[in-house]
Amino acid sequence: MSLAGKQWIFKTDFEQESAFLSRELSFSPVLTRLLLNRGIDSPEKARTFLRPAIDHFHSPWQMQGMEETVARLFKALKKGENIIVHGDYDADGISASVILVQMLRSLGGSVAYYLPNRFAEGYGLHPDSLKSFQEKGVSLVITVDCGISAVEEADYALSLGLDLIITDHHEPLGSLPSVLAVINPKQKSCSYPFKDLSGAGIAFKIASALAEKAGRDLPVDLLDLAALGTAADVVPLIDENRLIVSAGLEILKQKRRIGFQALADVVNFDLGNLSATALSFILAPSINAAGRMGEAGPAAELLLTDDQKRAVILAGELHDANRQRRDVERKILKEAEKAALKGPLAEDEKIIVLAGTGWHHGVIGIVASRLVEKYNRPVVLIALDGNEGRGSARSISGFDITEALAGSISFLERFGGHEQAAGFSVTADNIEKLQDSLYCYARARIKAEQLKPKLYLEAELSGDDINFSLVDRLKQFQPFGEGNPAPLFFSSNWKLKSWRLVGKDKKHLKIKVSQNGLTLDPIIFAGAYLEPLLQKHRKVDLAMKIKEGFFRQEKTIDVEARDLRYCDSEDFEAMEIVDLRGLKNRINFLKELVHNKESNTAIFVSTSARMKEIQNYCSCGKKLCFLTSGSNIEHRIIPANCKNVVLYDLPLSVNLLRPLFVDDRSGEGTEVYLLYNEKDRRRNRALIEYSLPTFEILKKIVFSFSASGGSNLSEQLADLVKNTLGFKPADSYLRRMEEILGEIGLLQEHSSAEDRSEILKSWPACLENSPAWREVVGLCESCEQFQYLYLEGSRKEIAASLKTLGES
C-alpha cells in the first residue's frame, strides 16, 4: 500500500536484451535496464547516448525551409538590410532571440530583437508591431518560438512589403502562414529526424547552417543559450536536446558569458556545479521572471552584454523580479486552490478550469503547474482583466491540452501550444461556456486511472547495489530532464527504524531504514503529511532516487524517497493483514500502535498473566480489549469499534479468535497485526501437553500400572498421573485420561489380570478403540495444522482463515 496514494508502475522487463547489453558494455543489469527503458537497445546506441558529442548533431540542411531561410538571411546581410528577430517573452523565446541576434551580428548584420510585452500585446505576432517594423525601415522579420499559427498576421506582413520567416516548435494547427519560409520540424512535410527541438534548439540549427554557409565551425559558444531554452521549455532531453544541454552545460561551466556569471553570483550559485536541473530551477526562473512580471528585454540584454557592470545591474533586477514573481505566485496559488476545492474538485471534475480577477497573467502558468502536481489532473487558469481573459493551461500525461482547447475553439479568441502546455485568450462572456466545454471534453476522454499519480520504477536495487560505483555510473546518464528523468528505483524489505521532520517549516520527512547491516536515511521532500502513517519496526519498500552528495567534505550517497509502502501487509477486501511475525521487540511496537491509533484495539494473548503485563505497559489511557486462551469464547464479545486486532501470541486454535471477528468484523475495515513468533509454537506445544493426554504419557501410565501389579487403576490413576507429569493436572485432564483408559478396557472394575494383559499385548493398537483418544489426536493435529498455517502460511491464507470466522 503506497503511503502517498500513488500507483507504482514497473517498466517492461527486458531480460534477454539486458543480458546481451550487459555483456557487450560490461554494465550491471541495473544500468542496462536503464538504457533499455530509454529505447537504447544496441551497443552503438548506448555509446552515443553515454558519450554525447557535438559531431552527433543532425545536419541542419535536413530541416524543411532551411535553405530558403539561410539564402534570404545572407541576402539581407549582403545588402545591409535591417533585420528583426521576433521572439517570445519566456526563457526559450529569449534565448532563441539572442542566439540569432548574436550569430547575425557576428556576420555583420544590422539586427535587432523584439520581445512582445505579455500584458500589452500577449503571445505571438501582432499587426501593430509589424507596422512599426515597416515604418522603421525593416525589410526582413524572422520569428523564433512563435508564429506557426499567425496566418492573418503573415498576410498583413506581406501587405506591408515585409519578408517574413517563421521558425517555431509548437504544434501546427490548421493551415500554415503564407510566408517566405517556415521552419518547424513538426510540420507534416518536414523530414528532419528529430521533432522535439525547443525554440532555442531550432535557432541554434539556423545559426549552425549560417556558420557552415559562411565557412565557419559549429557555433559552440551559442550552446549555452540553446541549453537554457531547451532546459527551461521542458522538452524531452533525448537525441539532439540531450546533445545541446550536455554540451551547453560544459560551456556554461566555463563561465564565458558574463550575463550568466552575474546571474549565478546574485543567486549565490557556482556555475561549476551546474546541472540541467539547476539550470531549469535556479537560473531560468530569473530569465523567465522578466517577461512574466513586465518587459522581457532586460533578460535578453543581460545575455548579450559584454559590460560587466551593466550585467550586475541587470542580474539584480531580474533576481528582484523573480522574488516578486514568487510572492505573487503564492497568493494566486492559495486563491486558486481554495476555488478548486469548492468547485471542480468538489464536483469531481476531471479537469480544473478557473478564472480570477486580478490574477497576474504572467504567473498563472506556474500556478497551473503546481496544481497539476498536487491534484494530478489538467489545469486551465484564466487571468481576468475587464472583459479580457488570458489563459494558461498545463496537462497530465496522455491528455493533449492543446487538442482540448481546439475542441472549444468557438469560445476562444486565439490559442496555441503543445500536448502538455498551452496559452490562449478568451472574453469574459465566454468563460463559462469554455468551462462547460472543457469539462465535457475531459469527462469523455480522461479515465479514472489517469487521475491517480503514478511512479514509473525503472529497476530494482538490493542493498548491495547501492554503492559509489553505481552513483558514478549514473552520472553518464545525465543531463536528466523530461524524457530522460533521473532514474527512480525500487528497493524492497527495509526496516523502518525512525524518522523526523526537517527543513525551515518542518515540511520534509527524513526517515532511517536498515537492511542487512546497511542503513540509509532518505529524505521525502514535502512529505511531512506522511508522518502519522509511519510505524516503527515495520518493513517498507522504497521508490527512490540516488545521487552523489557531500557532507563535511566527505563524499556520500544521497537518497531521495518519492514514496514508500509497507511490504509486510496486504489488503484483502476490507481486511488488512500486517505481517510482523518474528518481530523482536513486539511489546514496544504494540505500545506505539495503541498510542497512535484512534480506534480501540483488541489483543489476543495466551494467558491472563501476559494480559496484565501488557495492560500495565501499553494502555496509554486507552481502553484495550483482551482475549486469552482461557476466555469463555461463547460469551466473550469484543466491541465493534475495535478496528485494530492484534494477535500478540499465537493461539492454540482458530476458534479462540472467533469473538474478534463475530458478525463479520472483517467487512468494516479491520487491521490485523500478526506479532507472534516461533517461540509461541513451542510454548503452545507445552500447553497442549499440559491440557491433553499425549501418547507418551498414556504409555508411561499404563505400563507403570502394569509393573506395579495393582488391580484397580481407577484408584491409582491420579497419583500415577501426578508422579508422571511432575505436577497435579487439571480435573479436565484427569477426566479425559479416565475416559480413554475406560474405553480401551483398563478401568473395568471386574477385569481380570488376564484381560488387562491381553489389552496391553495389543498396545498401542487398542487406542483406536477409544473415541476419546481419536478426539485428542484430532485436536492435536488440528492445533498443529492451525499453528503451521499461521506461522508459515501466506498473508492471503491467513486472511481467508480469519474471514471464515465472520461467515460461520
Image: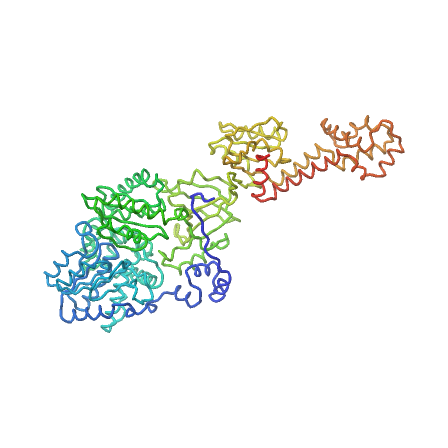
> Residue at 30% of width from left, 64% of height from top?
188
In the rendered image, is residue 225 in sight?
A: no
Choose top left, top right, bottom left or bottom right for residue 344.
top left
Q: Is residue 124 left or right of residue 248?
A: left
Q: Nearer the viewer, residue 719 or 446?
A: 446
Between residue 646 and residue 267, name the one nearer to us.
646
Q: How is the image coloured?
A: rainbow
Asked whether residue 790 appears in the rendered view, the answer is: yes
Q: Is residue 76 left or right of residue 344?
A: left
Image label count: 0
Position of the C terminus, as image quadrant, is top right
Residue 670 spot, x, y in % from top left = 51, 36
Image position, residue 674 (x, y; %): 56, 39
Residue 501 appears left or right of 392: right
Provide residue 607's location: percent of width, then percent of height: 62, 30
Q: Is residue 595 left or right of residue 264?
A: right
> How far across and how far down the image is residue 149, in percent?
23, 58
